[in-house]
Each structure stands twice: as structure tokens, then as C-alpha cells.
Image: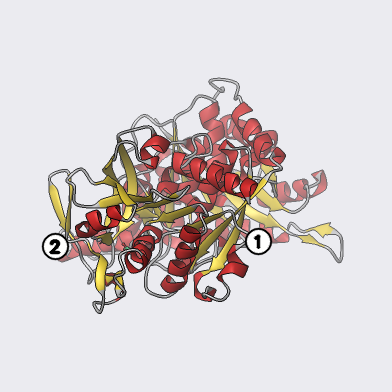
């Protein structure tokens, strides 16, 4: 039977619950166990798909097309297990299921309540589709004390009681702040957070303390005493130089050992952390740098392009280069400041995006990359903007644009009419925005001898998508005459998936999101190749 590890957070948000859960999962894998990580998010959106990245960071897309929390990306990258739609749920998702059932009359006249209906639905999610996993790590979003997370905490309390205390473990992650004025580490916020958790019936078994400085024995004793936790289970986590160091640092603090000891399990094998050590050294020792300009709307919030930042770092790892990101606000780009803003970068990347705002700045930057032979990588919206730029300047269609910005244009990018997955036909939808895009894995066939087919060294690829609009296939031959090759198309020959410029050292636009499939130990070939090309560009300029 699987054992369940619940991870909650206290004091403040953004302490690194996702990274801690992912690190623990990796350590358990290295000890020979099968693990699965799940996340419960307390907000009312049915999924984060309709949320602005400023609100909640990137939306991470799974193979099966679920729009999920960005922590799911950490889990995938650290465990190399592809997540599914069964691995992330929100309060909104739970309520919408329950309300649908209520409307159908499934509750047979009963009163529908938070306990037991909502809590039962949460419990069902936690153990749903569990097969032969040894451990399920379940992270609860938000911070203990929030009104919204109460049903989740009640559900995990009940869950632990249902399966027995010995089969479930509670980890609580808190902050131990350092006060400069008194030169002291303060344990009181942790004590209060644990008090709050205990008032809900949950006694943590392990406390992970995030701190700027190492926590001395005296403070650990205090936490142990007031929070009723074995001192060996007070684990510190101090800022690491690279995220790849996190599993190493948790292992040093014996987190994995304490988890197994709690469950009274003897480790299947001694964990070998060489892969984490090697990758950490690679990142810390790479001195040569390459500057990449990311041009987007959400450049002020780091988490908005989380997987992209990671995938670029992976591209750096495979070339032993440090990738420095220059985040440029697309709204601030104008013809007269392009050169000043872009001359420092050796590669230009335009990520996914929605809406007209900032699109003209992106188009101007693409023109600059095209004319100055600067490696250019357009992802989803970035590819669509590259096609609009080429239509305006190579095909001379002056009012070329996307129907996403209104109908007053020649739509070289337009709403996808329909697409097929398995036997099902889906239709484009601009009215209902939640979960109606072309989402998840779709195949594409690569054109022989194209740059992309060399990079992938494959004929057929399968990548994760998240889009409602698509490049109009009707213009293919006109574009190809001008050197913009459609180097991958969907198997039915209708949807352009990759474009590349024949007359340019590295100019590729992809309709999918390769960043979601890139992993530290298996960097995505497009990112490795892009970073290599950008570095070459730096050497020659
Ligand atoms: N807004 C564009 C579309 O829906 C691009 C989406 C994206 O970049 N993920 O097609």
C-alpha cells in the first residue's frame, strides 16, 4: 500500500514547498522507491488556465492537456515522471464537480455540505488512480491559517485517520527569520504556525525550517520542544546557489532518512546523488556566459516563465554555458530603442502570450533578429508573431495580423477551426475560455533536411500545446518562396507546427511549448541548439 506524505506551509508563502516536495521525491526515487507528487490548490478557479501569469505564475501543461500549477513543472523536472490531470486540483475544480452532481440530483435529496461532501471529494482526489507507487507526496497550496485551505487541511486530517497514522506523514514548512538588529534567529513564527495547524487537528511529524542562516542546536531544541516534534525531525533548508543543490542539501539534513525512519522502513538501497552533484558542479563551474533576451509582457514576475527559464538553463547545461536572461518588456520596445535594448543579447526569444498588447514590440524585435542574423526562437505566440512579421515585410501584406486582435486585418494567424485528438474532433472556441484551447500532446511530422529535423534527428515529434489560434496553412507556398519554410505540420497536413528561415543562421518558430518537456538531465534539443547558436553568434560579433 502507498504511504502518504502531506506537505503544508506556514508563516509566509513562497518558501519553496514545491521544490522541497520535488527534492524529497527525487531522494526517495534514488533509494529505489516509486513516487508520485500531487498538488491541491485552494483557489476558486477551476484550473489556473484562465489566470493571468501575474497572479499565479506560469500555467504548466501536462501531456494529457491539463492546465496546472507551475509546481507540477518542478515535480516533473526533478522526478522525470510526466504528471497527469490527476495530479493537480483546485477548490474550483472540486466545487464544480460537486455542483454538477447536485444539479443531476445525485445526492438524492440530501444536504450538500463541506464536510463530508467536499472533504470526501478531496480525499478521493488524493488516492485516485494510485497504482503501485510506494509514496504519494501531496502538497497543499497556500499557507496554514488561510480561510480557503481549511477544507483541504480537514480532508488530510481525516485521510490520515482513515489510513492510520503510521501510513501518513505530515511535513510542515515554515520560516525561521533572522533579525539583524538582535542578531538572532526567531522560532516564534514557527511555533505559532504549528499551533495553528494543531488547532486543526494536525500534528506535524517533520518541520522543515527555511532560513537565511544555519539553525543552531539551541533553536532546534526550542522548535522541538514547543512544536512537539523529535529534534531529529527539525530540518533546516538554507538558500542554495542553484536549485539542483536542493536534493543534496536535504539529504545532508537527513530528510529522506527521517521519512523512512518514521514509516519504519529500511532503505531499499543507498542513494547515489552523483547526478545532482554533477549537475550542480556543471552549473556553478560554467563561467562562459551567453545573454538571451526574453521579450514578453510579464517580465517583472520571474515565475511567469518558469519552465522557459529552466529550459534555457538546461540548454546552458548541455553546452557548459551560463545563460543570462535579459527580460525585456515588449511594451517598451520601439523602433528607435530596439538597437540599444537588443545589441547586448546574442539570442532573442519570444515566449507564449495572449492579446494584442506588446505584440508590435515583439514584431519589431523579430524583424531586428531576422535582418541582423541574431538567433531567434519564437514559442507559440512568438511563432505567430514571426509569421505576421514575415507576411508584412516579405510577402508585403501590410495589414497582416492575427484574428486574436480583431477582424480588421488579413488573418495570417486565425482561430483554429477544428482539430482532431484520437477519434474526437474539437472546434475552436473564443467565447468559453476555460479549457477550450488545443491542449497537451500532439504529433507533428518534420520536413526532411530542415534545420529542425537535424536538431531533433527524428521524423515525428510529439510536443505539448496550448493555443487557440494557428498560422494559416493557405500562405505556405508564398512564405516558402521567400525562404520561410514550414518545417513541421500536423499529421493531417492542416496545422503548421514549426517554421524556420532558410537564409538565417538560426530562426525557428514553434507552435508548441518545448519548454514543458525539457528536463535538467535531458535538455530539450531545441533549447540546446538555440543556446549553442547564440554562443556562436557571440563569438563572431
Ligand atoms: N494567444 C495565442 C493562441 O491562443 C498563443 C498562445 C500561447 O502562446 N500559448 O494561439
Give the residue at x 31% y 59%: 467
- Nearer the observer, 445 or 514: 445
Label 2 vs 1, first from the N-terminus: 2
Quadrant of the displayed image that contains ligand 1:
bottom left
Quadrant position of residue 451: top left
Confirm or deny contact between disc 2 and disc 1 (CB under 8 A): no
Give the residue at x 25% y 61%: 436
Q: Which residue is mark 2?
A: 105
Residue 242 relative to residue 71: left or right? right
- Nearer the observer, 191 or 455: 455
Give the residue at x 46% y 42%: 518
Q: Position of residue 186 (x, y in %)?
A: 77, 59
Inspect this view and state whether residue 114 appears: no
Quadrant position of residue 343: bottom right
Can you tell me whether the CB of the residue at mark 1 lies under 8 Å from the nearest atom of ligand 1? no
Callout 2: SS = loop
Q: Position of residue 243 (x, y in %)?
A: 62, 45
Callout 1: SS = helix
Residue furthest to the bottom: 408
Q: Which residue is mark 1?
A: 192
Q: Position of residue 102 (x, y in %)?
A: 19, 64
Give the residue at x 64% y 55%: 174
Colouring mode (rainbow / by chain / secondary structure / one colour): secondary structure
Amino acid at each position: 500500500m502507498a504511504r502518504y506524505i502531506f506537505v503544508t506551509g506556514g508563516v509566509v508563502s513562497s518558501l519553496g514547498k514545491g521544490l522541497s516536495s520535488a527534492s524529497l521525491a527525487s531522494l526517495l526515487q534514488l533509494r529505489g522507491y516509486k513516487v508520485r507528487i500531487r498538488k491541491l490548490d485552494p483557489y476558486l478557479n477551476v484550473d489556473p488556465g484562465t489566470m493571468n501569469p501575474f497572479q499565479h505564475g506560469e500555467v504548466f501543461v501536462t501531456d494529457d492537456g491539463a492546465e496546472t500549477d507551475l509546481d507540477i513543472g518542478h515535480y516533473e523536472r526533478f522526478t522525470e515522471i510526466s504528471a497527469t490531470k490527476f495530479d493537480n486540483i483546485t477548490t474550483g475544480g472540486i466545487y464544480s464537480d460537486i455542483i454538477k452532481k447536485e444539479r443531476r440530483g445525485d445526492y438524492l435529496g440530501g444536504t450538500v455540505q463541506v464536510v463530508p461532501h467536499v472533504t470526501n471529494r478531496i480525499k478521493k482526489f488524493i488516492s485516485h488512480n494510485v497504482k503501485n507507487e510506494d509514496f504519494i507526496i501531496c502538497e497543499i497550496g497556500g499557507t496554514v491559517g488561510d480561510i480557503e485551505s481549511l477544507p483541504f487541511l480537514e480532508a488530510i486530517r481525516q485521510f490520515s485517520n482513515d489510513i492510520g497514522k503510521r501510513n501518513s506523514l505530515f511535513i510542515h514548512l515554515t520560516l525561521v527569520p533572522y533579525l539583524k538588529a538582535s542578531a538572532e534567529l526567531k522560532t516564534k513564527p514557527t511555533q505559532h504556525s504549528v499551533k495553528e495547524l494543531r488547532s486543526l487537528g494536525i500534528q506535524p511529524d517533520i518541520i522543515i525550517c527555511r532560513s537565511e542562516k544555519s539553525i543552531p542546536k539551541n533553536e532546534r531544541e526550542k522548535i522541538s520542544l514547543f512544536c512537539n516534534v523529535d529534534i531529529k525531525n527539525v530540518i533546516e533548508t538554507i538558500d542554495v546557489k542553484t536549485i539542483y543543490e536542493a536534493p543534496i542539501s536535504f539529504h545532508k539534513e537527513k530528510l529522506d532518512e527521517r521519512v523512512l525512519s518514521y514509516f519504519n522502513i529500511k532503505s531499499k538501497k543507498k542513494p547515489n546523488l552523483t547526478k545532482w552533484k554533477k549537475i550542480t558542479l556543471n552549473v556553478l563551474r560554467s563561467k562562459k556566459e551567453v545573454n538571451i533576451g526574453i521579450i514578453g509582457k510579464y517580465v517583472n514576475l520571474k515565475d511567469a516563465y518558469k519552465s522557459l527559464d529552466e529550459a534555457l538553463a538546461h540548454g546552458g547545461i548541455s553546452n557548459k554555458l551560463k545563460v543570462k536572461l535579459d527580460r525585456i518588456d515588449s511594451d517598451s520596445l520601439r523602433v528607435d530603442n530596439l538597437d540599444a535594448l537588443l545589441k547586448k543579447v546574442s539570442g532573442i526569444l519570444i515566449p507564449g502570450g495572449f492579446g494584442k498588447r506588446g505584440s508590435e514590440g515583439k514584431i519589431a524585435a523579430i524583424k531586428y533578429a531576422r535582418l541582423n542574423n541574431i538567433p531567434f526562437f519564437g514559442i507559440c505566440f512568438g511563432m505567430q508573431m514571426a509569421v505576421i512579421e514575415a507576411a508584412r515585410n516579405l510577402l508585403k501584406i501590410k495589414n497582416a495580423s492575427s484574428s486574436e486582435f480583431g477582424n480588421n486585418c488579413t488573418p495570417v494567424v486565425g482561430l483554429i477551426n477544428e482539430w482532431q485528438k484520437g477519434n474526437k474532433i474539437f472546434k475552436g472556441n473564443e467565447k468559453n475560455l476555460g479549457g477550450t484551447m488545443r491542449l497537451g500532446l500532439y504529433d507533428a511530422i518534420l520536413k526532411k533536411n530542415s534545420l529542425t529535423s537535424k536538431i531533433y534527428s527524428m521524423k515525428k515529434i510529439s510536443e505539448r500545446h496550448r493555443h487557440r489560434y494557428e498560422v494559416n496553412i493557405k500562405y505556405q507556398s508564398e512564405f516558402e518562396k521567400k525562404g520561410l519554410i514550414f518545417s513541421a505540420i500536423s499529421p493531417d497536413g492542416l496545422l503548421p507546427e514549426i517554421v524556420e528561415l532558410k537564409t538565417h543562421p538560426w530562426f525557428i518558430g514553434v507552435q508548441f511549448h518545448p519548454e514543458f518537456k525539457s528536463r535538467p538531465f535531458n535538455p530539450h534539443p531545441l533549447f540546446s541548439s538555440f543556446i549553442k547558436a547564440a554562443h556562436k553568434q557571440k563569438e563572431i560579433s
